Image: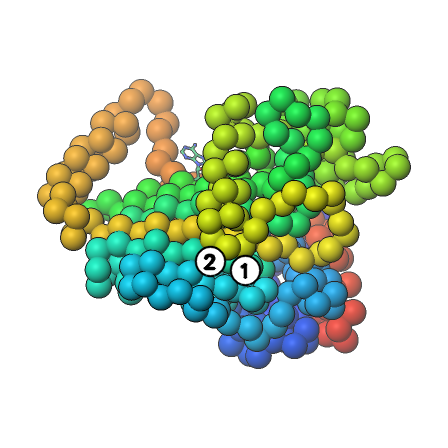
Amino acid sequence: MAKTFPAAHLRQTVAAIVAAAGSERAEAQTVADNLVLANLSGHDSHGVGMVPRYIDAVLEGGLKPNTGIAVKLDGVSLLALDGQRGYGQVVGEQAMTLAVARAEASGSCVMALANAHHLGRIGHFAEMAVARGLVAIHFVNVQSRPVVAPWGGGDGRYGTNPFCVGIPLQGREPFVLDFATSRVAQGKMRVAHNEGRRVEPGYLIDEKGQPTTDPGVVVVPQPGGMFGALMAFGEHKGYGMAVACELLGGALSGSGTWHRPADNQRAVINGMLAILVNPEQLGTQASFAQEALAFVDWLKQSPGDVLLAGEPERKARQTRAHEGITLDDQTWAEIVAAGAKLGARVA
Ligand code: NAD
């Protein structure tokens, strides 16, 4: 069973719960807007279904409401920032606002953001940069539970480490490639598990390292309290990219890497290395504008239905803005229960 809600209703509901967990009104609204936009964009794994986890993380002390970035190093086009375990939706926007201003002023910016709580959909931050005509590349690591198996390995050793690149296209909608380096996002396994669905072969191994189609192996503890693991996308190549995300988003950012057994902490900590380039100042603007469009048009002329990254999300936004956002009963029940823990009534 499932319920469909208008986006505005979910925004109000989530903002009320986040505020009940101690956030000031503006922060609660930013978190709510961000999560609902992820649902509208078709990524339910990074939408309002995250709220129960965020509330648990606040109650455990791993997520700190009303906490902004601290500037650790300001080298004009080099920024090292610390999210101090504040809401990723808030510290991520603060960090990107600073980085965008630097790239606009000096042509580029390398920004390291450590210790953000869950940044959610990384494409959101690339969209902030491309809206200003900038190219943005993001390497992100995840410290929560080691849920992805290294290529050739048999248990989870690292997170779903997302990679994202946003590229403005003159006079057109931008290219926004944004994905987890696991074959599928962990949150999509939670959604599939809540809906009682099996997933395709090749996505998962169980707690014994054997292939399985049961998403529950990465959502609920298996016999002996063990978990299964997600596989990397693209075999050794996706695995290598995930390692690059851990080394750049985790180690180089100052956030830290995962190298310990799983614990039961509810907080999800993201580290991000963002590289922003202003094409206008690189001296290749004319070629960039023309050649990029020529290439995109060339792709689109291929027989069949060719999409460019970013299009599926924009299409989903149009549809869901009209038709509403559908949540399965389990996800909704968990949101209601999260509100109840804080004395917020959710209807
Ligand atoms: P996905 O597998 O749905 O891939 C999405 C990307 O592929 C998008 O860029 C989309 O535009 C593009 N795409 C989809 N269909 C296409 C087609 N037919 N042709 C061309 N391009 C196409 O994404 P995912 O791996 O499930 O990740 C979902 C979200 O989860 C992302 O927003 C990611 O940032 C987020 N995430 C966040 C974290 C975190 O810790 N913050 C961790 C993992 C994932």
Identity of the residue drawn at 81% across and 37% down: 226
Colouring chosen for the image of the structure: rainbow
Q: Quadrant of residue 195?
A: top right
Left or right: residue 183 compared with residue 81: right
Identity of the residue drawn at 74% across and 45% down: 262
The amino acid type, in three-letter code, at marker 2 is: Leu
Q: Is residue 291 above or below residue 258?
A: above
Residue 235 location in percent, x, y?
54, 23
Q: Which mark is residue 113?
A: 2
The amino acid type, in three-letter code, at marker 1 is: Ala
Residue 176 location in percent, x, y?
37, 44
In the structure shown, which secondary structural element does the residue marked by tag 1 occupy? strand
Identity of the residue drawn at 37% across and 46% down: 137
Q: Which mark is residue 116?
A: 1
How many marks on residues?
A: 2
Q: Nearer the viewer, residue 192 or 210?
A: 210
In the structure shown, which secondary structural element does the residue marked by tag 2 occupy? strand
Q: Let me know if residue 167 appears in the view.
A: yes
Identity of the residue drawn at 39% across and 51% down: 274
Q: Nearer the viewer, residue 104 or 327?
A: 104
